[in-house]
Structures are given as C-alpha cells and as structure tokens.
Image: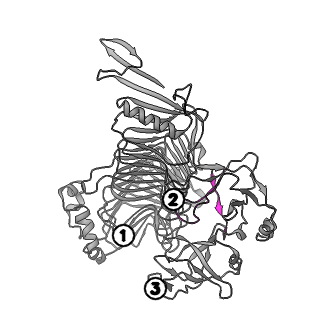
Amino acid sequence: MKISRVWYVVGIVVSLYWTIPTLAFAQQSADFFVSPQGSDKAPGTEQRPWKTVAHAIKKVQAFRAENPGIKVQLYFRDGVYPVEETLSLSGNGSEAPLELAAYPGETPVLTGDVQLKRWKRVTDRSVLDRLSPEVRGKIWQADLKKAGIESFGTLIEREDRLDLYWQGQRQQLARWPNGEFTIAGKALGATTLPPTWLNCHGTKEGVFEYKDARINRWIEEPEACLNGYWYWDWSESFQKIAEIDTVKHQISLEKPDHSYGYRDGFRYYGLNLLCELDAPGEYYVDRDRGILYWYAPEAFDRKSDFVTVSVLSAPYMLSVSNFDNLTLNGLSFRGGRCSAIDVAGGENVRLKDCRIAQFGCDALHLTDGKNHTVDGCLLQELGCSGIVARGGDRKSLDPAGYVVENTIVENFSLFKHTYEPAVLFDGAGLSIRHNLFQGSTSSALRINGNDVLIEYNQFFDLVKESDDQGGMDMWSNPTYRGIVVRYNHWRHIVGGTHNGAAGVRLDDMISGAKVYGNVFEQCGSVIFGAVQIHGGKDNHVENNLFYKCFAAVSFTPWGDRWKSSLESPQKQKELYEDVDISSELYKTRYPELNEDIKAHADRNFVSDNLVVDCNGLFLRENGSNVLQNNSVVTSNTADDVGLDYYLDSALLQRFGLLPIPFESIGPWENRYMETVTNDRE
C-alpha cells in the first residue's frame, strides 16, 4: 500500500506520509495491488500484492470504510483470476472514488471458465456407431470430470448453461440441419387455434408432423431438443422432445406449450444430438458420463489452442450495489454461464476500456442509477443481450443520464435469438453514440422510453434470422417521445420472412421520433423499407441517404384503428397514468402533444431524402403523410460509382440535403477495434 497526501500552504509544498490530513483541500489517494503470483497474507503493496480478487475487494472496502475521504486505486497485474462466486462491491457512504484498473500495459482477466487441455480421439465403439460414418475419426473428446467440472448446468434454459469456446468463439451444440432450418408438416395438436392474418392452420399443443425420415435417428437421443419459430417468425424458443413416433412421423414436445401455439409449416431445427455431430465447431456433452465430444475446426491444434467451457454459475461475476464514483478500467471478464456485471443504483459508475466476452446471458445490467457510462469497451460472444439498462423517470422526465459510447458489441443473441439486443433501454435519458453494433439474429437496439439520443453509430449485419424486426426496434407505446436517431450508418439489414427487416422500425403507434442524417445501405426486405412506420404519426424522416435499399420508407397505415386503440383501457393507462401527456411538462418537452393526439392519424413528415438505386421510394403510402423534396436517382450499373460518391457534400447540396458527417460515424477511440470482425470497408 502506498498513500500520498499533498498540502499547498502559502505556496510551499509539504509532503506528508502515513498521517490523515485535516485541511479540507487535501488531495488523498491510496494504491493497492493484486496479482496471481501474490498472497492473501501480504499487505497488498506493489512489491507484495494480494492474490485473489475476492480478498482484495474485501480489504479495499474495509480500508474505504475506515478512510472515507481517500481515493483508492486497486491495480490488477497481468494474468488470470479465477472467480468461483459473485464478487460484491457495495456503497458504504464514502464518496471518494474507487478505481479497479489494469496495471498499465497489462491485461488481467477475471474468468469463470476452465480450460480443456487433454484431448484425445474418440475410440469408444458405442459412440462411433452413433456417428455418421464420414466423421468417425474426426471427433475429439475431453473428460469434464477430470478437468474438475462437476456441474454440467442446464441444457436449454436461459441461465446456467455450459458453453464451449474455441479461441474465444462460441461453438454449436450438435444440430440438424447445419446452419439452417427444416420445415414442419401439419400441426397435430388437439385444440385448433383461431385464424390469424397468416391464414394457416395452427394448434395449441406441441404435436406436429415431421417430413424428413432422418429424424427417425433421434429416437435414441436421451435429451433431444428443438429450437423453433413455432407460430410467429419473431418469437422462437427451445423445447425438449417428449416422444418421436417413427411410424406416424410425429414429434410431441414436452410441456409447457409455447404461448402462441404451433402452426403448419413452422421453421425449426434439432440440437443436442450426438448422431448429428457432423460439422466443424459442433459438440455434444454426455451428461451421464461427463464426456464432451467435439468436432474441432480444421485449424485446431490440441497442443496450443485455447479451448474453454463456462463454469461459473452465479447470476453475476461482479455485483455493484449503490456505489458512487466507481471506475472499472481495462479489465476483462470472461466465461460465465449467466451474466457478467450488475450495477444497481449509485452514481457515476464507469466502465472504461473493459472487455466482456463469452457469457451465457448478458454482459451488463444497469438499474436505477444515475450518470453511468460505458466507454471504449468490447462486448462479444454473448448468449443474450449486451447492455440491459433501466433508469430515469418517464413521468417526471428525470433522466438516468446513462451514456454508451465508443463501444463495440458484436456476436450477441447467440442463444436466445429474438429480443436480445446489444442495448435494451427502459426509462428516460440515454445517449448512445460512436458505437459499433454487429452480428445478430435480431435487433441491435430496443428502446422503451423517452429522451434517447442515438448518433454516430454503425449498425451492421443484423436481423439475420428473425422477422418483423429492425436494427433499432420500438413498439406499442405512443408516449415514448424524444427519440432522435441521427448520423448513423445502417448496413446489410435484409432478413425476415413474412414482413421483413428494417434499419429503423417504429412499430405499433410509435410517434414523434426524428430520423435525420442517416445512411441506410442495403436495408429493408419483403414488405419493409429501410425505415418502417407501423401506425405511428408525427415521425420525421429527413435528410437521409438511402443506398441500394429495398425501399426507403414503408408505412402501415392504421386509419380509424389509431383512434380506437387510443381509447382502449391499456392505452389510456399509458397516456394518463404511467405518464401524463396532457401535463405542461410533456407538452413543453414534446410540442406535437399540444395538438389532439387523436387527430391526423398516419401523418408523418418525410423530406429532403436522397434515394439511390433502391427498388422503391415508398411502400403503402396512403396520402396521409407530408412528403417533400425526396429525390430518386438510378445509376447506370456499368458506371456504379459507389456510396462515397453520393456522400459528397456538394452533391448532397444539389439535391437539397445538408452534409452528412459520414467520416465521424463509428467508434473514434476503441483499443479493441483491430481485433473485431469489422466490415466497415
């Protein structure tokens, strides 16, 4: 431990050590150290550091309680720190800052995983006989019990799953079909569902016909599971197989049934199937014997490659409660079965240059705090969401003051494929700026709230599997106001089945949003444009460049449905109880609410946009919208000059647009940028 205190008295600098100063303007700090080579019997100095994180946190909290005015830094030396239970930090009344930081130039890792080092080829005849002939001799096995792993966790539940990672990349439970879906036959449950606009037959119970006789092989699998979009292609889930009837070609699923039921011809795939272990990257765990079988990628080197399984089953690796002025700087968190960090309450908690990877659920939860910041971080290989943030007061519009900036979130929603975005926000007061979000089966942003600024971000390769989604998604509540989406780049968001995928999707009455100065490149599909407005009004889509999109803007007009929906008990509660749109506060903050909210259904303002080489300008525009100065350009394919040509300020000005600061979009300062899979070029 090193303590320094500096006083300035009549221009003379006097340095004092080991005594608590009494002058109010004293600057005080204390440094402690932890190292994998240290000892918990040591004093925690740089020369004699502590060994374990849990002990170091305990000692630091005790020191802060005794010395509430002293700023404390706990430095982590290079190496790996195993975490076996939740690490806890709780506020103790001290307002002095605490920083948990990587020692300069070093890379400490807090980990909840175990490395598998002893691999051998499978020779067990009973196992080989269950594999396809062409892969026998290619499968490796590792004994989990000999690696010290006693709990194999749950199988298809959200939390406490054992996941396998090779060189930091999540591997796939053995599945069929590989990388795609098969299509069910008829739904065979006893209770027929009411018809929907899909105009197809469906049943309440999970019994259905399968078409491919290959599935007959699964009857020998002890814990066979399915993942399916059982009725709607925006809602998937995992379910275990209860019975396979190979004569009737029927599958019965374990209860409970999915809440939406099952329709004819839904998409699904099977997994946790040893007999389908037939593609590089797939694995299977014999949970009775504790043996993991893996079809390693071709580049696998069993002597040097880093292969791990997640072990930590605690809800969080780090829990922070009611803590003010905390900084986590340069730390890495890796390999838990659940979520990484929970920050509840408190003010001014900052994650700076941290890496959070390989967690079964989410990277970070922020709840009921103020002015928390995520800056320069990398969040990747996540089973569910990146950041789940809740804060601020929508009724008083008191802002949470959260900021997410210069951060990369990639390869998320790997386990749960819908409604697990990079950032999910409930509340009021959030800024999302200069980030990169890429690689998801569904959305990158889900915004449920007010006064959210989304600017200078990159959104790439999203909504790859689900339907009726957007790279940014909002829905249902017409009191969500103050949403500004400006100067972002949306690229390659083209998935979907029945409805499609949009860059920005304002669904089910979302109103009053502003979408300004964005670049939409290859966005929109099926019946969605790059911007999709479903039933909302008073949204502004202005000064955007749409490049090679399915369409620029699509609408789903509601007409009389708008007024009748507003009169429903649920909407009346949202309008006048959850918040009060008739209050002076709301009318002042959101001037459009000075007009009767029931008036002018489906009126949106779309102006000064440039639409280049898109299949269409508008879809389902019914004359209710205000449309001005939207220019359509079709280039000669042989002379395709590329996106940069149309971003030229002089050219944009010719079409009535103000400049779009494209070169400023994306992270400007992220130490991990060169390590991610980035297709910005």
Q: Residues within 10 Å of mark 2 (few under 14, many from 20)?
A: many
Q: Residue at x 38, y 38 (%)?
A: 325
* Secondary structure mostly seen in the magenta stretch: loop
Horizontal and vertical percent for residue 490?
48, 56
Task: Tell me the SS state at disc 1.
Answer: loop
**Residues at circles 2 and 3 in contact by the CB criterion of under 8 Å:** no
**Residue tagged 2:** 384
Front-lying residue, 195 or 372: 372
Q: Which residue is mark 1?
A: 508
Image position of 434 with respect to 198: above or below: above
Name above or below for residue 237 compared with residue 658. below
Quadrant housing residue 268: bottom right
Q: Which label belongs to residue 193?
A: 3
The residue located at (51%, 73%) in the rendering is: 233
The answer to whether residue 162 of the structure is visible from this angle is yes
Q: Nearer the viewer, residue 551 or 63?
A: 63
* Sequence-first tag of 3 and 1: 3
Q: Amino acid at mark 2?
A: Cys
Distance in Å between CA atoms under marks 1 and 2: 24 Å
| Percent of width and height locating residue 435 | 47, 48
Residue 259 location, x and y as percent?
46, 76
Whichever of labels 1 and 2 marks the residue nearer the N terminus, that label is 2
Question: Magenta region: which residues?
Answer: 151-176
The three-letter code of the residue at mark 3 reads Leu
Of residues 226 and 118, the one nearer the viewer is 118
In magenta segment, residue 164: yes
